[in-house]
Image: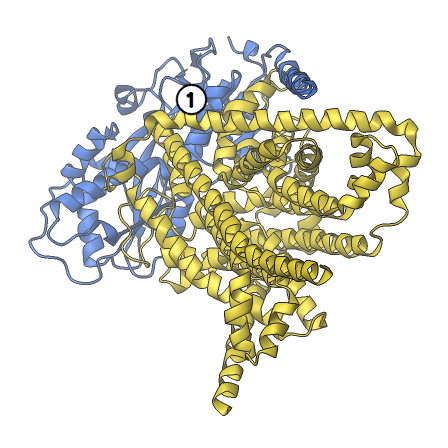
Chain colours: A yellow, B blue
């Protein structure tokens, strides 16, 4: 008996330890960035930093320098980030909302499945590719209507960011719309509303909170994007002068200067990270408010609106048309971007490029990059997945529901999942790279990416754990199983499909991430990495490096093609595993239900 | 049937929006493109482009105009790119664009201009008539002694063998002492046994020198195949400034920095110039202009000239 008890305690301690490690790691980033930026902020002056409109840093400024030679005001970049994010929200929000409505209510199941999968593919395309697509296809299009003779700037950045947040907006909005009870829709139809009226006046208002939540999450994505933005925004630190003005965002500022920044300048970049954190925290706060607000006034008065106002009939009809147009627009855009990459890249994929080792001075080859990518995946998954799952188990299975402590942890994890990847890169460069011998290595990159993945893994594992009905646990306890046994034999297997697809999506993120790896793992094409302490470029970084000197553009596009196929395969796997395992467990549930029904029938007989 | 009609209608509308965007005509405006502040290419360009009074873009950005200066001083609205590749893509796609990239990166998708009537080429760089040129520099720390392996690699970089590689890579070879800031190219003989100590060599700095360094390391590994592994080299490139930074912070004596612009006279680092490179001023192939003066470049990048029609 005692042995069992000891085992229980040991496991609880283990889970708690994992949770503590995660939380410490997560808090460490926050504290580290804030503390490292304080000297710079006090030297520059908080007011001058946030409201100063001249950014002209001097690399040789140190904290003892007086007065500072450079000027460190980031107002222009704050404005730039806000403008481009709002633009992205307008474009991505409208397109995303109507596309989701289209997918949820105006198309057949086959279109829905294929279209949905393709939109998920959009989420996995590395942002570097969006950047090149923006430069090569969209900007020349806009150049014709631009008064400056060039299409770069606010408008194209908003458009590209809008497309980049589209998968998030569509997925969440669609889930929200589908979660609306069918009875509401049927009730509206029964009262004489047309299909369009029922959708726009009943279903959409009922899903309001998840739609707003989708938009807020999209905003978080847009504000944190880096690599695509630095190719199309123009990057001059000034307030954007109109739709085609060159401007710089906060994330772009960090990635452009972190490599060579002097003391005060580095402090100022970290402080830029802090301001970004503040923005993300505000966005998450809004997110939380919307979610909890939405729960409170679910159902009720809004529902009558649609059917009682027949004069709005036209609006609903227009809504349907807009949904179609948006969906087609998104489809056209998708075809364009995928077609562009395939046309530029596919002819240049050769066996030599893919499977030959690269040697210094030789022709570019991707095998080392592929190996580096795999090693990075191994490191980051080995660290992030067990820790994340254990933390989620601790939070979900061992703590009291609704405890304040857990709520705080949860919201801090949410904040972390919104931190721009470049801030993780900055953190990794100043900590892990230093710890692992001062130069970039796969291990340093892996640790950086792991911390970045943790929040996502924790949250999605928690979601899957929550979805496991309590009756499963109770049944197991009733049969005399202990908590650990219940968790490992009952809860985890039932939650497995969700966890697995979360892991696969995490791998997708590792594969397509660029900015945080350039300064932690390696930035140029290199020969085979020498173990985990060697440096290497991942495929996404190799893509950027190949395009870097304009000498290997064909190979760069070929790499983009390879990456896209990889993301496609990963997405397919995620869907497949989710479905396959889901079916298995659902099958069991159905079986249970069926026997109940049968017994009911037989008793009725 | 209704659905198909709907699909066709929306497709037409979506396309219509696209066509409307293409409808209007082009313009004569100059789209000013430059590199980010850590770039050696930019430094080299800024130091040469000067007006009649002799003020360079470098002076303009750092001293003359600190208040109005956006990032170190180009005209408001100028665009900055973090690599040669993105800048060249931009120029290749934009009719009114002007930018600058290493001559070795120029291909048929962009047009290199003559500067002051001189087209960039190996010959015009060597005789100095093409003005916008810069050295490729190797640097190492002045206060810390290099490790035996790093010293041997440096001897190789200084050698005539290295100059052969420079020529193979299309660079302008430098063998004379004065232009190199050392005693001139030396003979390199590979050591018969591995030098003592740690074998790691850290390479940081200019992305413009990526190809050259790759080839040099390849040759070095070939010559010393008995004891050198490619993985002994730790190479990460993010611009000339990062190279200088890494050399300054070097405490082990194994950092070789690369910069693609000249070192200052009072530099705190040891250095020598391994090759010369022309910075080509590039425009879109559709642009009719073929020659430009340094003063015009200065005016374009400071905003005194904003239209192509002003350059004749």
- Judging depth in this view, the residue of A244 and B272 nearest the camera is A244
On the picture, is B222 further left or further right than A453? left
Q: Is residue A441 visible?
A: no
Q: Quadrant of residue B293?
A: top left
Residue B230 in percent (x, y) is at 22, 49
Dot 1: chain letter: B
- Judging depth in this view, the residue of A572 and A455 nearest the camera is A572
Q: Residue furthest front?
A: A605
Q: Quadrant of residue A214?
A: top right
Q: Is residue B187 visible?
A: yes
Residue B51 in percent (x, y) is at 50, 23
On the picture, is A153 further left or further right than A492? right
Density class for disc 1 (Cα within 10 Å; few <14, some 14-19, many ≥20) is: many
On the picture, is A84 further left or further right than B245? right
Residue B128 in percent (x, y) is at 30, 23
Q: Residue at x 24, y 36 (%)?
A: B178
The correct choice, above or below, for B162 with respect to A604 in the image is above
Mark 1 — residue?
B281
């Amino acid at each position: 008996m005692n042995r069992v008890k000891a085992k229980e305690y040991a496991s609880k301690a283990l889970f708690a330890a994992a949770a503590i490690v995660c939380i410490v790691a997560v808090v460490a980033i926050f504290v580290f960035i804030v503390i490292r930026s304080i000297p710079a902020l006090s030297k520059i002056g908080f007011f001058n930093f946030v409201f100063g409109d001249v950014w002209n840093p001097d690399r040789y400024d140190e904290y003892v320098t007086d007065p500072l030679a450079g000027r460190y005001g980031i107002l222009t970049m704050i404005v730039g980030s806000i403008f481009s994010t709002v633009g992205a929200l307008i474009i991505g929000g409208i397109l995303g909302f109507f596309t989701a409505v289209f997918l949820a209510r105006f198309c057949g199941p086959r279109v829905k499945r294929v279209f949905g999968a393709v939109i998920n593919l959009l989420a996995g395309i590395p942002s570097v590719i969006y950047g090149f697509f923006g430069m090569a296809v969209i900007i020349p299009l806009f150049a014709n209507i631009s008064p400056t003779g060039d299409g770069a700037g606010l408008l194209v950045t908003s458009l590209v960011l809008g497309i980049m947040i589209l998968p998030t907006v569509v997925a969440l909005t669609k889930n929200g719309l589908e979660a609306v009870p069918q009875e509401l829709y049927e009730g509206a139809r029964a009262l004489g509303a047309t299909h369009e009226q029922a959708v726009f006046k009943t279903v959409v208002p009922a899903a309001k909170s998840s739609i707003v939540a989708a938009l807020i999450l999209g905003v978080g994505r847009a504000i944190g994007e880096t690599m695509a933005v630095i190719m199309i925004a123009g990057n001059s630190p000034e307030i954007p002068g109109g739709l085609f003005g060159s401007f710089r965002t906060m994330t772009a500022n960090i990635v452009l200067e972190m490599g060579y920044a002097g003391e005060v300048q580095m402090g100022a970049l970290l402080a830029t990270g802090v301001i970004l954190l503040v923005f993300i925290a505000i966005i998450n706060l809004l997110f939380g408010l919307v979610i909890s607000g939405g729960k409170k006034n679910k159902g009720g008065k809004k529902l009558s609106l649609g059917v009682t106002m027949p004069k709005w009939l036209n609006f609903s009809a227009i809504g349907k048309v807009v949904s179609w147009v948006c969906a087609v627009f998104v489809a056209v855009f998708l075809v364009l971007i995928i077609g562009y990459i395939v046309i530029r890249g596919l002819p240049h994929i050769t066996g030599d490029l893919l499977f030959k080792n690269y040697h210094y001075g030789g022709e570019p080859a991707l095998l080392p990059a592929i190996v580096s990518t795999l090693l990075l995946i191994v490191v980051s998954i080995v660290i992030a997945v067990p820790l994340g799952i254990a933390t989620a188990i601790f939070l979900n299975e061992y703590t009291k529901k609704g405890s304040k402590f857990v709520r705080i942890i949860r919201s801090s994890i949410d904040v972390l999942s919104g931190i721009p990847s470049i801030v993780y890169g900055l953190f990794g460069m100043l900590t892990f790279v230093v710890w692992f011998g001062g130069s970039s290595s796969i291990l340093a990159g892996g640790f950086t990416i792991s911390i970045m993945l943790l929040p996502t893994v924790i949250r999605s594992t928690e979601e899957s754990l929550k979805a496991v009905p309590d009756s499963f646990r109770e049944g197991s306890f009733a049969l005399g199983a202990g908590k650990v046994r219940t968790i490992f034999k009952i809860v985890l297997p039932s939650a497995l499909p969700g966890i697995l697809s979360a892991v696969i999506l995490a791998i997708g993120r590792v594969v397509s991430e660029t900015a945080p790896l350039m300064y932690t793992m390696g930035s140029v094409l290199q020969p085979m990495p020498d173990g985990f302490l060697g440096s290497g470029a991942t495929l996404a970084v190799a893509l950027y490096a190949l395009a870097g000197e304009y000498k290997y553009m064909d190979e760069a596009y070929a790499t983009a093609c390879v990456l896209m196929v990889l993301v496609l395969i990963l997405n397919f796997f995620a869907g497949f595993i989710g479905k396959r395992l889901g079916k298995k467990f659902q099958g069991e549930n159905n079986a249970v239900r069926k026997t109940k029904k049968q017994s009911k029938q037989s008793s009725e007989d | 049937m209704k659905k198909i009609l709907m699909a066709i209608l929306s497709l037409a509308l979506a396309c219509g929006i696209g066509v409307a965007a293409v409808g209007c005509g082009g313009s004569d405006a100059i789209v000013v493109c430059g590199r980010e502040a850590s770039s050696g290419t930019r430094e080299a360009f800024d130091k040469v482009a000067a007006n009649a009074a002799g003020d360079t873009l470098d002076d303009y950005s750092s001293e003359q105009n600190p208040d109005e200066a956006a990032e170190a001083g180009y005209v408001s609205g100028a665009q900055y790119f973090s690599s040669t590749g993105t800048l060249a893509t931009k120029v290749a796609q934009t009719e009114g664009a002007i930018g600058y990239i290493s001559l070795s990166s120029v291909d048929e998708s962009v047009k290199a201009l003559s500067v002051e009537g001189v087209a960039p080429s190996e010959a015009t760089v060597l005789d100095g008539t093409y003005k916008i040129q810069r050295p490729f520099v190797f640097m190492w720390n002045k206060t810390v002694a290099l490790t035996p392996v790093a010293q041997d690699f440096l001897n190789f970089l200084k050698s005539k063998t290295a100059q052969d590689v420079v020529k193979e890579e299309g660079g302008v070879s430098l063998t004379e002492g004065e232009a190199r800031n050392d005693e001139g190219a030396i003979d390199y003989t590979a050591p018969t046994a591995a030098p003592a100590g740690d074998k790691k060599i850290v390479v940081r700095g200019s992305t413009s020198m990526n190809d050259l360094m790759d080839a040099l390391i390849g040759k070095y590994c070939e010559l010393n195949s008995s004891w050198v592994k490619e993985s002994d080299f730790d190479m990460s490139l993010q611009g000339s400034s990062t190279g200088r930074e890494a050399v300054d912070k070097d405490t082990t004596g194994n950092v070789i920095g690369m910069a693609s612009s000249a070192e200052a006279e009072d530099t705190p680092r040891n250095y020598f110039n391994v090759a010369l490179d022309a910075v080509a001023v590039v425009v879109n192939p559709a642009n009719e202009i073929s020659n430009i003066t340094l003063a015009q470049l200065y005016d374009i990048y400071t905003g005194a000239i904003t239209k192509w029609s002003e350059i004749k």
